Amino acid sequence: MKTETLGLKFDWITILIFFALVTIGWVNIYSASYQDGAKGIFDFSQAYGKQLLWICLSLILIVFVLALDSKFYERYSGLIYIISLVSLLGLYIFGNEVNGAKSWYLIGPASIQPSEFAKAATALAIASYASEIQTDLTHFKDQLKAFFILALPAIFIIPQPDPGSALIYAAFIFPLYREGLHFVYLLLGFFAAALFVGTLAIGVAWVALIVLIIAGISYYRKRKKRGALFKFGTIAFACIAFAFSVNYIFENVFEQRHRDRFNIVLGKETDNKGIGYNTNQSEIAIGSGGWTGKGWTEGTQTKGNFVPEQHTDYIFSTVGEEFGFLGSVGVVFLFIFLIVRILVLAERQKSQFARVYGYSVAAIIFFHFFVNIGMVTGLFPTVGIPLPFFSYGGSGLWGFTILLFIFIRLDAANYYYT
């Protein structure tokens, strides 16, 4: 389904889903931040009033993004990427510290978080690189360059400290896999995560024993093949060495608040009145919603401010309490529909640049959506990853808007509909 705008055909379905998510997000921000005595929806002293202003301004941003020639994004992708890196580095000199993180520029009454815009810039850069090499990412040299493009913004973001925003760059493994990156990288990522969590949960000794057993069984099955002992021995050694490094990384790289959150999720600590308070209250709010919820602005956990900063990272708990299981499923369905739609459009692109960028957009939105829902429901540690188009924040809304509508603009130029 297409609509004619500025002489081009834009995907109306994707645009409608975007506006649906933004509207539902604002409705829940209103409920989570409304205070008695407020002057109305245009009360800019309230979070919902500020968010409404950001939404209105995003309409101007959308027109600007769609008005630019699609070739602009490909031609200047490198420059956009460099500007984003400079903006991240500039935080260490000119940044404003909020909640212990130097992640924002203070511009008049507004705060701008450059890491939210760096995701789109990195997606453009990786799409440009993949299209320039003209081959699949099967050569190790090409893979290293791609990983370097992804690593730079993450490295600049981690010391702010903002590990949640840096973690998002792991999502780019999926568009790279689509472009020929070997499946072994996905397996390595999965096993590294499993080893990390497993070591924290049951200890190095048990993990080492499990690795040796698996390696032994694998060798026994492949023992007749040349080099099998060396192959499985090397893998086992690498896994055990990584397991021994986990405790050092956990104790010396992670901050105490991050260690506490991991320990709570793993069941090693219980702190429902301290570091685990937000997650515990979020679970209570979601659970109290039942099938159909308590009704808009009627959530007792929400109105009682039992979930701190509920209008930001924990906004989904408002959905669960006030709109219940059915409302939560509806929101989840909308996100899945959007992601699938982007992937379908990406596969139709005649330009590799547009295809890679489309996969990057889908991966970033999915990663945010998946981790945030897991965080709010207590399945994952709290890492400060917002829910796209839902969580309060002008930088987040603008960042995701730019990310999505650049792809809509590329799609209009690179896929010809009959």
Image (spheres, rainbow, N blue to C red):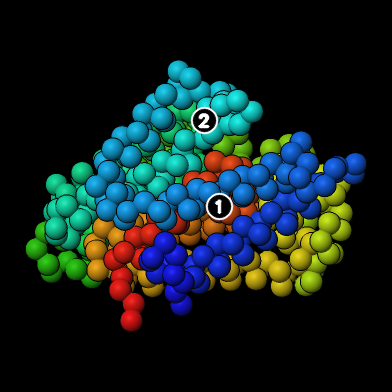
Left or right of 80, for residue 402 = right
Q: How far apart, in angstroms, are the residues tagged by discs 1 and 2? A: 25 Å
Query: Can I make out residue 354 in this image?
Result: yes
Number of disc labels: 2
Q: In this picture, is 395 found above or below 323?
A: above
Q: Quadrant of residue 230?
A: bottom left
Q: Position of residue 364 (x, y in %)?
A: 44, 54
Left or right of 59, for residue 212 = left
Q: What amino acid is labelled 2 in the image?
A: Ser
- Residue density around tag 1, few if under 14, some if 14–19, many if 20 or more, within 10 Å: few
**Disc marking residue 103:** 2
Q: Position of residue 158 (x, y in %)?
A: 44, 33
Residue ID at (53%, 29%): 104
Q: Position of residue 351 (x, y in %)?
A: 24, 64
Question: Which residue position is annotated with label 1?
Answer: 59
Quadrant location of the C terminus in the rendered image:
bottom left
Q: In this picture, is 156 found above or below 382?
A: above
Check whether the beta carbons of the residues at disc 1 and disc 2 lie within 8 A of each other: no
Q: Camera-side residue: 232 or 82? A: 82
Q: What amino acid is labelled 1 in the image?
A: Leu
- Give the mark, 1 or 2, whose residue is nearer the N terminus: 1
Q: Position of residue 239 (x, y in %)?
A: 32, 48
Q: Camera-side residue: 21 or 190? A: 21
